[in-house]
Amino acid sequence: MINCITMSCLGKLGRFGNQVFQYTFLRTYAQRYNLDYQASRWEGQRLFGLVDPSIAGRHLPRYNERADKTIHNSAANYQDAWYPPIIPEGREIAGYDYRGYCQFHMKYYSPDRKFIQQLFVPTLEVQQRMRPALDSLYQTDGTLIGFHMRRGDTGRAIFYITPNEWYLAWLEKHWDRFYHPRLFITTEEPTDVEAFSKYNPVIASELLSLKTDRYSFYNYLPYDLRNPTPEAMDWFPDWYFLTQCNVLLFGESTFSFSAAMMSAKLQECWQSRLSTQEFELIDPWGCQPLMREHLDEYPEVAGTRRG
């Protein structure tokens, strides 16, 4: 048996949140079973100073991630990628090139939590760029609350839009129980931030100068390139600032879920539920990363679909 696992899809299958999960699985699996690993180029190598053996001339047979279809879903045309993935057993993928999203229940990853978090520490250069902005965010001794309001390509299938009203309802109920709360928001549609003016929110572009150049090894979607705003091109500050929050709220998104995974400051984590139309308190190291509730099952829920 070949004592190696490769991942040629890394950096090509999905955007940053997906890539965090893929790399997490690659490194965790290799460590658990004492395997060598090889990875294709991806932006995390620059951001986190990762030095990975490259896939050079090695073409292992592909292992396609398997879907757990025992979980019932009544939505029509429910695709394999929307089902929870089946966790590989033992060394069954040693000697293969793994292709998939690796978004297993977090109980699979939690034993290696410390190892995983150490992988995703930004380089000194990246930290120095973020430091003045981070100092501004924490200019008062209080609670930093972070909202990720995913918009962009969402509003379809299992990736529903979490309406502004759900965030506002949570704020109305919880804001006053935090010590000196401050609100940070990240979203592809900055105009949505106006709805939260009562809470004096801040966004990344107010904290530092965002770059307009594309990242060299990032898989931008056609949506991003049709609308090449600084927020879309220079997305890493948003993710990093989310990792520095004490409280996080987000919808069906691996971008913000992966930020919750890497946070050393997180006190509370809330994820929206399409079935209840509100946020639910979760443990990001003890739950499913995605709830996979399909919009077709909840046609009556307003504001969750792309128009």
Image: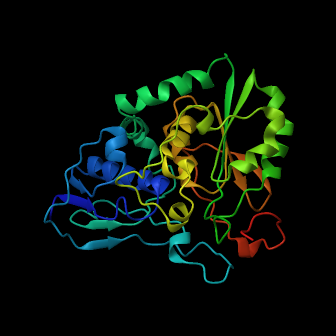
Classify residue 45 by image quadrant. Answer: top left
Picture residue at 48% right of the left edge, 48% below the top:
212
Q: Quadrant of the N terminus?
A: bottom left
Q: Nearer the viewer, residue 198 or 155?
A: 198
Q: Quadrant of the C terminus?
A: bottom right
Q: How many marks?
A: 0
Q: Which x, y percent locates residue 261?
A: 51, 42
Where in the figure is residue 124, as x and y percent of width and height?
35, 28
40 up-or-down from 117: above or below: below
Instruction: Inspect this view and state whether residue 65 appears.
Output: yes
Above or below, 69 relative to 142: below
Question: Which residue corresponds to the image point at 54% horizontal and 52% vertical from the top-left?
Answer: 232
Residue 157 in the image: x percent, y percent?
64, 72
Q: Residue furthest bottom?
A: 76
The residue drawn where x is 64% and y is 67% is 158
Which picture quadrant has residue 9?
A: bottom left
Q: Residue at x 49, y 53 (%)?
A: 17
